[in-house]
Image: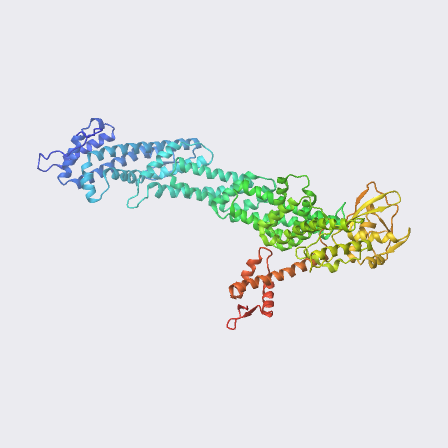
Amino acid sequence: MMSSGKSRVKMRPPRNRDSGDVNFDDSWAILSTAMQEMYRKNASRLSYEELYRTAYTLVLKKHAERLYSSFKTFVAQHLREIVSTELAPLASNTTNSLLTSTIGGGGVTSTIAVPLAAADKREGGIRFLKAVKAQWDDHCLCMRMISDILMYMDRVYCKELQLPLIYDAGLALFRDHVIRNNEFQAGEHIYAIILDQIQLERDGDIVDTSAIKATVLMLESLTEDKIDGETVYSRSFEPKFLRSSVDFYTTETDKLSRECDSSQYLIKTEKRLQEEFERAMSYLSVTSEPKITKIVEENLITKNIVPVIKSGASGLTFMIANDRFDDLKRLYRLCKRVDPEKTDLRSALIARIIQQGGEINQDALEVLKHPDKSKGVTVQNAATIAAFKWVEEVLGLKEKYDCILNDTMDGDNQIQTSLTNAFSSFINQINRCSEFLSLFIDDNLKKGLKGKTEDEAEAVLDRAITLFRYITDKDMFETYYKTHLAKRLLGGRSISDDVERMMITKLKMEVGFSFTTKLEGMFKDMKVSNDIMQEYKAHIQNTDPERTIDMSVSVLTSTNWPVSLSTIESHTCVYPPEIERIKRSFEKFYVDRHSGRVLTWNPNMGNADIRVAFRKRKHELNVSTYAMVILMLFNDLADGESLTFEEIKAATSIPDNELIRNLQSLAVVPKTRILIKQPMSKDINVADRFSFNVGFESQYIRIKIPTVAYINKTETESERKGTMDKVDELRRYQTDAAIVRIMKARKSLEHNILVAEVTGQLSSHFHPDAALIKKRIDAMLEREYIERSAENRQMYHYLA
């Protein structure tokens, strides 16, 4: 029959010329003889049309059942003969390193163990696999030819009774009479050989993977009866393979743990994983890959990764300390394979960061506790240097772990969160972190950024912001930053207003507008002050052109500036008459233009330039306002006369702490000893006397005399206590305001919810204590901003 396109020969059922019965035995003799010829590879001499007609007639005459059964019996007998004559003799010298021989009569057998060399074992096993594969190929070819001549039985009989088709039945017969032969189970030999070959390859030998792959494909082609999706491979071989792999990797884990350091262990673990992956993909079944991978992961990673990480000589700590980035990459990849959360790795990183951070904290605290032990620096400078060192070391540590995170751990978000928590933990363990960071910024904005480009300056500020993010009590930082900013602005020490504003912008982006409102107000005050002074100088030129003393005044809004500057009572001073006249002149000028405002003078942050005549020459001294007031007392004294500490205090009303600091600057520091102190010592005492040092000499005409412990100084314990008291007071006000805002919006709220919402609102400034919130709620109850519910004592109502 011809069809369009390619021609294809079709077998048609023969015409029914004989309606009589047929002799089954005669017909079967013809068919079985033909099958034998097929197995003998003489199929070319057969007439397929005649064979097909014979099988067709048997089915047509209701002999299909006998034909089907005879076919199975014939094939089974043939396969059993193949096993006994071809495969069994070949297997005796190949598997399990054993030779089996029969000794004596009565069927008594004795198994004699004879070790085989690896090469013999490999080659003998491969010969057996190839022999089985050859028989399998021959069998499959014969089954295709037999299914062609029994095609009509497939279509009619097998489909009607839902029996396996001839080809499928032939494969099942191969499975049952070769692979699972009762007398000689070739399958067990096959499994043992493949496992031996795998073991040889695991030990570093080279094996014939193509022969193993062909055998595995055969096992995958043989399905299990009545079990959907199951094959001989998955049901019989794979469990043995997995069990042997568990035994191997249990031993391998112990071996590597004993013989390898952490780096070698990680390298060999990755190598084993890659080998098993390639083995499964190249000559085992792809379905085995996830199973064998899991076995390797459970044994080499899950069971042993913690000791690898914690190994003191080569573990995580060693890798971090020695920048072993390749090892860290392997460690991350392996941990990620078995635990998406990377719990063990994250825990180890957190512990290490907190340990390193604790050491940095301890070093800083030791200097603060014992500053006198620092060589070559003063006590105050030692504390300041410790603060700078703390910031630099913390930032260095942060940059190192950022590099580790990005270069070895793919910027993993979970690990990044853990690193953030670890840094936040140890940074906030030292209660002076806010002060240290503010000092660091202050130093850079005064001199550290001098000569740097805009990009370089921004990079330094970004580093500071990085550390700022970790600080919990941001209101403490705000307090210190305002104080240092005030000193920079009023002392003219800032290198650039643009850089100052850049820093404020960065702070605003981090914590919002409310945080920087007062900082921006400080800049606004300085600009307004400059405008006022220009108007005042123009006014003086018109009204008092002969004035010989110039004065510059900064008019500050008290609410914008640090409390330490706006607390005027602690900064009193009696000015010299000529200064007092100028001061009153400015007050009148200012009040005339701004009626209703009150000026309160604060000399604490002022400075003055005065010209002083010494014996050899005149010098221009830049001193603090307090120092200027002290020096002008000596204008009225004759040569050789002196003033006591008490006399200076009475004449100037300068607070004791400020008076001591300024007298130290003027009379103790060798290079700026404008006054002579009797007796000479580092400390200022009540009984000390001071006289003008008319013989003072210096190579410079203009001399700057800084106040002792003024520049970049860390706070003393008493100063710190004062700062904390002020911050605590501000926190009470902020907590009260948050309670009122929330209750005004919600009207009624349960206690725990109110505490949670107050905490949420304040957390961007500081971490509020539950006890503080409860105390402020009680205060709001007493002041009748809120009241308790009569029905539920845990419920509060807002009172308008």
Q: Is residue 688 left or right of residue 520?
A: right
Residue 783: percent from the left, percent from the top?
Answer: 60, 69
Residue 323: percent from the left, percent from the top?
Answer: 59, 39
**Which corner quadrant holds the C terminus?**
bottom right
Q: Nearer the viewer, residue 780 or 390?
A: 780
Name the residue: 41% across, 42% down.
290
Q: As drawn, which residue projects farthest toward the bottom?
A: 790
Name the residue: 80% across, 52% down.
627
Q: Nearer the viewer, residue 694 or 773?
A: 694
Q: Is residue 712 visible?
A: no
Q: Is residue 33 left or right of residue 573?
A: left
Name the residue: 20% across, 42% down.
159
Q: As drawn, which residue projects farthest toward the front?
A: 542
Q: As drawn, which residue projects farthest toward the top?
A: 45
**Which corner quadrant holds the N terminus?**
top left
Q: Quadrant of residue 518?
A: bottom right
Tell me the colour scheme of the image. rainbow
Residue 311: percent from the left, percent from the top?
Answer: 57, 45
Q: Nearer the viewer, residue 459 or 195?
A: 459
Q: Is residue 586 left or right of residue 730?
A: right
